[in-house]
Amino acid sequence: MNSPSPKESRNDMVVFTCKDRFDDMMTCIYEAWASHLGHNNIKLRTEPLGTMELFCEYRHVEADKEKTESVIRTIQQKISFHAYQMVYHAAMAADEEEKLDSIYRFLILGFHYGRIRS
């Protein structure tokens, strides 16, 4: 009987990383979402990274103006301008290790529930 390879026997997490700048973070969100790896298999972190986790694949993301604009436009259209403002303020917050992943999780819920009606 063949045993599964180490890669097949565990569910590796993919950590998307970027610089702690707004455009980089929005591009990182775009790339993580577009990866189709499943939200439970993804984490997002800003650099510099603290302690790196075992059994994780790290993917560095560089800022891309078109992808940044796409994320901003999508947040404003599918959730609300207020949600975009919240994302922007959270991104500009002091160094919080989990801030980018928290923004990503917020957007997952926002896109699930849809546009906020005032």
Image (cartoon, grey):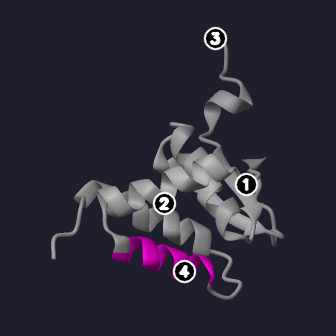
Q: Earlier in the sequence, mark 2 or mark 4?
A: 2
Evaluate if marks 3 and 1 touch, with contact meaning CB atoms under 8 Å apart.
no
CA distance for labels 1 and 2: 14 Å
Pick whichever, 78 or 39, lies toward us: 78
| Helix, strand or loop status at disc 3 | loop
Q: Looking at the picture, how far across and down is residue 71, in whole percent?
A: 50, 54
Instruction: Look at label 2 and name its amino acid.
Output: Ile
Kind of residue sitting beneath label 3: Met
Crowdedness of circle 4 by 10 Å Cα count: few (<14), some, many (20+)? some
Earlier-in-chain disc, 1 versus 4: 1
Q: Which residues are magenta?
A: 82-92
Closer to us: 107 or 97 = 107
The x, y position of residue 110, in whole percent, is: 33, 63
Q: Position of residue 98 (x, y in %)?
A: 61, 74
Q: Which residue is mark 3?
A: 1
The tag on residue 90 is 4
Give the crowd class for mark 3: few <14, some 14-19, many >=20 residues within 10 Å.
few
State the residue at coordinates (80%, 62%): 52
Three-letter residue code for mark 1: Ala
In the rendered image, which residue does mark 1 sit on?
63
Q: Residues within 10 Å of mark 1 (few under 14, many from 20)?
A: some
Nearer the camera: disc 1 or disc 4 = 1
Q: Quick check: can you spot residue 42?
A: no
Q: Measured along the vertical axis of the image, is residue 57 above or below residue 101?
A: above
How far apart, in angstroms, are the residues tagged by discs 4 and 3? Answer: 51 Å
Q: Is residue 38 left or right of residue 47?
A: left
Which numbered mark, 3 or 1, is in the foreground of this view?
Answer: 1
Q: Is residue 78 above or below residue 47?
A: above
User: Which callout, 2 or 3, points at the residue further toward the start of the chain?
Assistant: 3
Mark 1 to mark 4 CA distance (whole Å): 18 Å
